[in-house]
Structure formats: C-alpha cells, structure tokens
Amino acid sequence: MPILLRTAAENAYYMRLCLSLLQLSMLCVQLRLYLPALTFLEAALSLLRATWSPSRTWASGVRRVREWSFDAYSDAECWERMRFRKEDFPVLLREFGLENSGHADGLWRVRDKHGVVQCCFKPMELLVIFLARMASINTWSALQGWLGGKSVTAYKLAFAFVLDHIYGHFKHTVSDVNRWARDARRFSIAIKEAGVSRKLRMPHASILAYACYVPCAGAPASMCIGFIDGTFRSCARPSVGQEYVYSGYYKSHGLKFQSVIAPNGMIIDFYGPVPGRRSDSYMLDKSGFEVRMRRLNRSLGMRRGDYHVYGDPAYALSRYIMRGFKGVMNPRQAAFSRAMNALRVSVEWGFMLVVRDWRYIDCEKHLKIMLQPIGKLYWVAAILTNVKSCVMAENHDGYGNLIAQRFRCSPPSLHEYLHG
C-alpha cells in the first residue's frame, strides 16, 4: 500500500504553526507560567506527530505516494502516453536543462503566481508531467492517478513551470530561419532532387513538358529551401471579443500560425498567433519573414538568384516567396505547378506532426483564450515536434519523420539543434 501524505503547502502550514506553539511555550516558561507552557508544548508535539504521520488528502479517494519512480513506467507507456521512447528521457532531461535544480536535494521548487513555493518535484517527474499533459486530451483528474497521485493544483503548477522554461530558453530555435543559413544549399538540393525523382514518375507527356520548362522556370525553383503555409487552430468561443477571432472561412473561433517546413522535416521559421479572421498574407506581412530571408541571403553573399520558399497561391509572388502559376496555364506551366505543389504538401504534413503527437492543442474545448496561453502552447508544441524529429533520427530510424524520409534529408542532432 502506498503511504498517504498531505500536500507540501499543508505540511508547511502545520510546521509554521508548530514552531509558533513552541515559541509560546518557551515564553511561558520564562514568565514561570508552567501549566500554560506544558499545554502549548503538548499541542506542538501532537501537531508535529500529525504532520509526520501519513494522512488522506482533502480530495476524497485520492492517495499520495511518498516516492515517485520513473522505473514504474514501461517503454510502451512512455511511447503511447508521452510520445518518446523510455531510453530517450535522460537525454531530453539533460538537453532541456532540467537535470540540475540547483538545490542540494535535487528537487525543483515550483512556485505559484505570488512566488510562494507550493510543491517540490524530481527533475524526471517534471518532464513526465509536462509530456503526458501535452500528449493527452484527458483532464487533469484523469491523469492524476497515472502521474503519481499528487494534487491537481500541484500538477498544473508543474506543467506551467516546464512550459515557461522551454518557451523561454528555446523559443529562438523556431523563430528565425537564419539559424539554418549553413544548411540552405543542402535544403535546395534536396528539394530539387525530390522534384526530379517525381518527374520520372510522371506520364510521358508530362515528362516532356516538364523537361522543356525546367531550363527557363526550373532555375528559380532550384533555390527553394522550404515551404510556407498558415494553419488555423480552433479554440473555445471567448466570452469577450469573439468577433476578432472568428473565421468566416473555417466557421469557427481560433488563432492562426505561420510556419516554414524544411526538407529535413524541421520547422525552421514560426510565427503567431494572429486572430483567426486574418488572412495568410496579413500574417506574412506582420511576421517579418521576408526581412529575415533578405538577411539570410545577404549573410550567404548571394549574387545570382536568391534562396526562397514556396507557398500556395494565397501568397503574393515576391523575391523570397515563390508560388505556382494561376489562371489558364500552358502545358509547361501546368507541369511545373503540379510538380511543386506535390512537394509543397509536405508543409501540411508538418502541421499534422504537431497535432498528432501533442493532442492537447488539438482539443478546442481545452483551449480558452482568456484562461490559457494558447500561443505559447503551440510554440512549445512546435519545439517538441522538432525535438522528437532529432531524437528519432539520431537514435532510431535516421530520418525522424516522413518529411525527411520523403526528401532524404536528415535533421541535426538534438544537442546541435537546441544549443548550436
């Protein structure tokens, strides 16, 4: 049977009360009031015994275990409920900077919004709580027993602590395409070779049209380093200002995000959120992505042609954003647009990878604009998706996800991605 405990806040309160009773007892002894001193001493000892003895929590039927152990989770549970292999957790703990709490006992102190320490967690326990919440659409009450039986409030504080930690330390890994400047040539070659391999699978007539078109219009596509698109994430209807986040196109309330997917399956540039009623072109203008692309090309000293990304027809044609032909097309234009659009679908796969593993951000009833940091949740989900791709490529299959496998372009190691 597990040992039943109170919460850390309850124990701290009882200890403070016990010390106060002991101080009153000593004061009474100094005043030679021995009977009240004995009464205060007995009350303090009784309270001390109650504090150190097992007890039930205020939530009926919930048990608190004294010792939490990661060994209790099987590899199948880790993969199903936290989306990582069990052997990958020590690496994640180290690379996320959660391994060392800075305290002698090795525990992390989790504070509330007022800065008061409410509970203590082992480093691995924090990581398990965070990943289990991100990968599940269940309520905290449903996860409570599986996580170890502490109070729901404690788990919420732990989740917010890790969320802020990852967002604050690793937001830069997905916010600027310039981090990938040294890989630009490798990305462009991977996309070009994927387009050639697709051309070889076309019908004979399309092959001739595409081959005739590549010399004149295929050259700009040979400098493509990724695919850009926006996504809409539904949320619960806000009680105030619902018209600002309502999308007439999607017939739902929500927020929009913009991402650029590289051929190695990584999200290399991310922006958001913006109100759901805004268009992709508005989001592109506000994101400053073209400014970052200009800086990338200048840093690489590009003179003949510029690196660019490929988007759907909703984007305006510019120096750093290419799109397929619109309207009536001749056979060569149609063949080129067909080939590039078939590769552009990989950006949709990138959005799929985010919501496939981190289902918490895909349940609109859980996402409330006035109560939760939806933007921060999706940012961290994008970071976790990249992290998983690196881990899977480094330790398991060599590619990490189906996008990298499609383009045969591997992501970097986890340490290089997070700290490079």
Image (tube, rainbow, N blue to C red):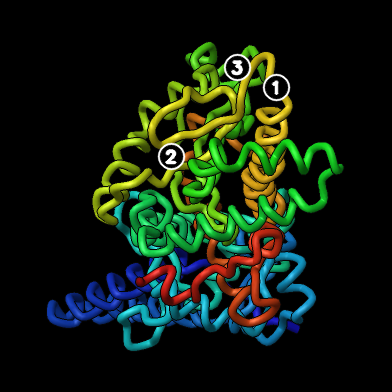
Q: Tell me where residue 163 appears, x and y as whole percent.
A: 46, 56
Which residue is located at x 39 percent, y 51 percent? Answer: 177
Identify the residue under disc 3. Answer: 247
Residue 261 is left or right of residue 43, and the answer is right
Identify the residue under disc 2. Answer: 271
Distance from label 2 to label 1 (Cα)? 36 Å
Residue 66 is left or right of residue 40, and the answer is right
Q: In the drawing, what numbered circle is on residue 330?
A: 1
Which residue is located at x 69 percent, y 69 percent? Answer: 63
Question: What is the three-letter code of the residue carrying label 2?
Answer: Tyr
Residue 221 is left or right of residue 1, and the answer is left
| Sequence-first disc among 1 and 3 | 3
Give neighbour class at mark 3: few <14, some 14-19, many 20+ (Cα, 10 Å). many
Q: Locate the N terminus and report the quarter of the image it occupies.
A: bottom right
Which residue is located at x 65 percent, y 60 percent? Answer: 407
Question: What is the three-letter code of the residue carrying label 1?
Answer: Asn
Give neighbour class at mark 1: few <14, some 14-19, many 20+ (Cα, 10 Å). few
Residue 110 is left or right of residue 146, and the answer is left
| Sequence-first disc among 3 and 2 | 3
Residue 16 or 298: which is nearer the viewer? 298
Count of numbered circles in the view: 3
Q: In the drawing, what numbered circle is on residue 13?
A: none
Task: Look at the picture and state if 411 lies above or below 231.
Answer: below
Distance from label 1 to label 3 (Cα)? 35 Å
Distance from label 3 to label 2 (Cα)? 18 Å
Secondary structure beneath disc 3?
A: strand
Task: Look at the picture and state if 255 lies above or below 415.
Answer: above
Q: Tell me where residue 23 appears, x and y as whole percent.
A: 23, 75
